Amino acid sequence: MKGKITFTMIKPDATGKNLTGKILSKITEAGFTIRALKMTRLSKEQAEGFYAVHKDKPFFADLVKFITSGPVVAAILEKENAVESFRELIGATNPANAAEGTIRKLYASSVQENAIHGSDSDENAQIESNYFFSQLERF
Ligand code: GDP
C-alpha cells in the first residue's frame, strides 16, 4: 500500500528568493496538508548525512555547500499516495526537463539549485521526516 506521508525541503535558492510562501501555497493548493514545518539551516554534517546516498557523486561537495548556504524550510506533508503525487508536483530534478506548471519548472534555476526536495520512497519519507522532526513537532 502506498503511504500518505512525504517529506519536503524548500532549498536555499528558493528561500533566498523569498519564494517560501508561494511554494507552500502551491503545495497546499495541490491538496497536501502540512503536518510539520520549520525553517532551519543544515550544518555540514547534517547535509552530508541527508545526502549520504550521493557521497560518491562528483557533485556531492557542491551539493553540500549549496544546501548549507542558507535557510531551508522542511515539512512533513500528508495526502493519498503522497510520495508519487508530490514528485509529480515538483517535476524532474533538472528544471530543463520539468513539466509545465511544476514547482521546479516555475522556480528552479539549475539541476543543483532546483528549489525543492521531495522524498523518493515511503521509506525515505520516514527517514527524512525523522531527520528533521521529533514526534512532538508533528501534528
Ligand atoms: P531529486 O530526488 O530529484 O532531488 O534528485 P537526486 O536525488 O538525484 O539528487 C539530489 C539533489 O542533488 C538534486 O535535487 C540536486 O539538488 C542535486 N543534483 C542532482 N543531480 C545533480 C547533478 O548532476 N549536478 C549537480 N550539481 N547537482 C545535482
Image (cartoon, rainbow, N blue to C red):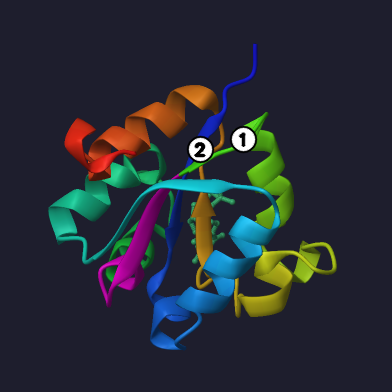
Label 2 SS: strand
Judged from the image, the secondary structure of the residue bearing numbered disc 1 is helix
- CB of mark 1 near ligand 1 (< 8 Å): no
Marks 2/1: CA–CA distance = 6 Å
Kindly identify which residue carries mark 1: 82
Vertical relation: 51 (above or below) 96? above
Residue beneath disc 2: 6
Instruction: Tell me residue 133's x, y (percent).
Output: 24, 42
Q: Residue at x 74, y 64 (%)?
A: 102
- The answer to whether the residue labelled 2 contacts the one labelled 1, judged by CB atoms less than 8 Å apart, is yes
State the count of labels: 2
The foreground one among 47 and 9 is 9
Q: Amino acid at mark 1?
A: Ala
Q: Looking at the image, which residue is at 27% across and 33% down? A: 130
Q: Position of residue 35 (x, y in %)?
A: 41, 43
Q: How far from the left and from the top, in percent, is residue 61? A: 31, 62
Can residue 92 be seen?
A: no
Query: Which residues are drawn in magenta?
Result: 66-76
Q: Amino acid at mark 2?
A: Thr
